Image (cartoon, rainbow, N blue to C red):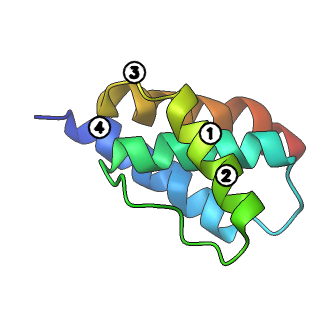
Amino acid sequence: MMDNELQKEFREAVDFINGYTSLLPADLLLKLYAYFKIANQNFNNPGSKTPLINAFKANALIQARDIAPEEAMKAYIELVNKEVKKRS
């Protein structure tokens, strides 16, 4: 079972991103997307109506496929703290 503190930090990082209104680079968004999906063990196909966006999202998931859910949570939190919060 995942550590409750890790889950709490992950949820706070997700909430921070969901409330973030400035533009972020596409590569950062794709990493966050992949880590989020893996952390939640949601491997459904990307839901964009744009095939190119779906391809980029699928590629991001493929690149991160060997990461465990706990590691994905940690990576998501680290990206938010190091790359997004410093922009705020």
Which residue is the site of mark 4? 5
Gap in Å between the C-alphas at discs 1 and 2? 6 Å
| Up/down of 3 relative to 71, above or below | below
Please state which of the two labelled residues, at mark 3 or mark 1, is closer to the viewer. Answer: 1
Real-space Cα separation, disc 1 to disc 4, in angstroms: 30 Å
Circle 3: residue type: Asp
The span from disc 4 to disc 3 (Cα, nearest Å) is: 23 Å
Callout 2 secondary element: helix
Q: Quadrant of residue 18?
A: bottom right
Classed neighbour count for the residue bearing mark 2: other residues with Cα under 10 Å, few (<14), some (14–19), many (≥20)? some
Query: Nearer the viewer's eye, disc 3 or disc 2?
Result: 2
The residue at the point 54 percent across, 43 percent down is: 34
Q: Residue at x 83, y 48 (%)?
A: 26
Above/below status of 88 relative to 82: below
Residue type at tag 4: Glu
Viewer-side label of 4, 3: 3
Determine which of the numbered discs, if any, sits on residue 55 in the image: 2
Among the two numbered marks 4 and 3 on one chain, the one whose residue lies closer to the N terminus = 4
Q: Can you say whether 44 is above or below 79 in the image? A: below
Quadrant into which the N terminus falls: top left
Q: Residue at x 39, y 21 (%)?
A: 66
Say whether marks 1 and 2 touch (CB < 8 Å): yes
> Circle 1 is placed at which residue position?
59
Look at discs 1 and 4 and give the one toward the viewer. Answer: 1
Q: Amino acid at mark 2?
A: Ala
**Mark carried by residue 66:** 3
Query: Mark 1: which amino acid?
Result: Asn
